[in-house]
Image: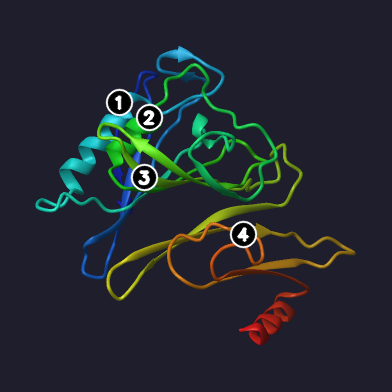
Amino acid sequence: PLLMATPGVPTSTEGKGSDYVVPILHSNDDVAALVWALDTHSYWCDGEDTRYGCIEDTQVSWVSDTVSASYTHPTSGEVPPSLVFFHIPMQQWSPDRPGVLSMHGQHEEQVCWAEGGRDILNDLLSALGNAWVMSVGHDHVNNFCLETSETVQPGGAERNVSLCYGSKTGPESYNDGVSGGRVFDLHIGPDGALTIETYIAREIRGVEGEREQHRVRLAAGSGMVLATQEGDGEGEREYVVEGSIEEASAVLTEIA
């Protein structure tokens, strides 16, 4: 009864599926953004056994139908910005390809996608109409974001999309590095314009003999801020303060 999402495709080729969309509302109840969760399944893609799963055509059709029926302005045809989350990346998450404008973050392992499955990113972008961000998991040692320029068919329109990884969140993964998560901050200005900022928040466990770290990110300016390195990114600064939370707060108060 407390579910705020709209469920999608009830079944799939494998007999299961879990896709959802959650509208983010302005104070006047207009839709400011759409948050999608799509199921990339397990070890099959397009009806074939593959090493990794993927998003199916039926899911893309559901996205397209949902956008057309519920989230397209009747006169202007405008669609709210979308943030899309799924587990297994597509081949376009590989940084070494045409169309990648910049990369921020850690790229420490191969991008593992459903090789053999068809390229469905174009169809998904077309169905969404106004995708700003897509974020995945799966590859535990990657936490980067790519700024990319994608040519969306039909029509051949160029669209800038951020293709991101999250960060490994638990102690049982194969990465011995620090746990954390990717945060997306959505800001709606007085004029109703939406901006999105994203960064990696780190979870540092206290270890005897070591001081805890508290990572705090201060951002200024507008637009999408993807960098997470100090001084990299327009108006963005990131500080790592060693010590207790109280000590960190005192330092940051002085900085502010």
- In percent of width and height, residue 32 lies at 29, 60
Q: Earlier in the sequence, mark 3 or mark 2?
A: 2
Badge 1 element: helix
Q: Callout 3 environment at 10 Å: few (<14), some (14 to 19), or many (20+)?
A: some
Q: In this view, does 116 lie above or below 232?
A: above
- Residue 231 located left or right of residue 243: left
The residue identified by callout 2 is: 17
Give the distance between the C-alpha atoms of the residues marked 2 and 4, in whole angstroms: 34 Å
How far apart in space, not on screen, are marks 3 and 1 (Cα)?
A: 23 Å
Q: Mark 2 and mark 1 in contact? Answer it, CB < 8 Å.
A: yes
Q: Do the residues labelled 3 and 4 touch (CB within 8 Å)?
A: no
Q: Nearer the viewer, residue 52 or 238?
A: 238
Mark 1 sits on what residue? 58
Q: Depth check: 37 or 188 in front?
A: 188
Q: Which sits earlier in the primary sequence, circle 3 or circle 1?
A: 1
- Provide the residue designation for mark 3: 159
Q: What element carries label 4?
A: loop
Q: Closer to the camera: disc 3 or disc 4?
A: 3
